[in-house]
Amino acid sequence: MSRNRYVRDYRLVENIDARGRIKTTYEYIGKAYYYVLSPEAARRGARRALICCAAGWLAFAGALLPLSTAARTVYVALPFAFAALPLGMMTALTFGQLSAKEPLEHRLADQAQNRCPACSFFTALLSGAGLLGEGVNLLRGLALLPGDGLFSLGAAALMACALTAHRQWKALQSAPRPGK
């Protein structure tokens, strides 16, 4: 993956300000992307995804706050704790998509089509792995605490929020207009 992936989409522009200093700015010269459905549908999808992210953060925090065996078991707590990384990325990307206006830059269109769905998928996968590990604890007969029920509920809620957010990305699909 290249760090300067979108460098060809921009041009540097040098201007002289009132003091005689050279100011360098950039100008977008790449393809203009437009939402496949409509800007209103995209805004609704981004809002729903942001609500899912907020609910996911509440579920994440609610699962880890009470004292539980799950939080002390490595194969349960580690995947669940790592779910915060894609959840955080998904939240930041959703804020960017919520403030985007047409025509979109290539970077924003690429994020909505590739990075956002991947983040929601990995959030669901990692929270599901934590939930599966809690099921293994139950089958092993470990002494479960009352907080384990809250952990399981929070992990299931986080997985549901991530899967619901995953469904919203179809509204944010964009493409360049044909013939332009």
Image (cartoon, rainbow, N blue to C red):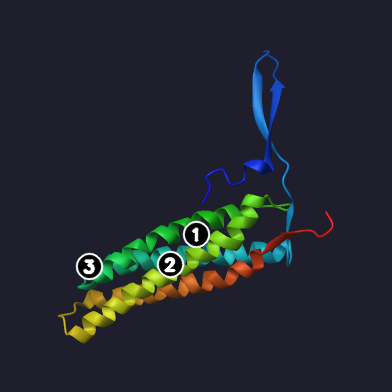
Query: Quick one: SS at disc 3?
Result: helix
Q: Is residue 16 above or below residue 162?
A: above
Q: Are marks 3 and 2 in contact (CB under 8 Å)?
A: no
CA distance separating discs 1 and 3: 25 Å
Q: Are marks 1 and 3 in contact (CB under 8 Å)?
A: no
Whichever of labels 3 and 2 marks the residue nearer the N terminus, that label is 3
Q: Residue at x 44, y 67 (%)?
A: 122
Q: Residue at x 22, y 77 (%)?
A: 146
Q: Which residue is mark 3?
A: 74
Residue kind at label 1, given as amino acid type:
Met
Describe residue 149's horizontal placement relative to residue 1 as left or right: left
- Return the x and y of residue 141 as percentages of the image width and height: 16, 85
Q: Are marks 1 and 2 in contact (CB under 8 Å)?
A: yes
Number of callouts: 3
- Return the x and y of residue 92 as percentages of the image width and height: 50, 54
CA distance separating discs 3 and 2: 18 Å
Residue kind at label 3, given as amino acid type:
Val
Rate crowding at label 1 as few (under 14), some (14 to 19) or many (20 or more) other CA atoms within 10 Å.
Answer: many
CA distance separating discs 1 and 2: 9 Å
Which residue reaches farthest top? Answer: 19
Q: Which residue is mark 2?
A: 123
Q: Residue at x 21, y 72 (%)?
A: 68
Task: Tell me if residue 153 can be seen.
Answer: yes
Rate crowding at label 3 as few (under 14), some (14 to 19) or many (20 or more) other CA atoms within 10 Å.
Answer: few
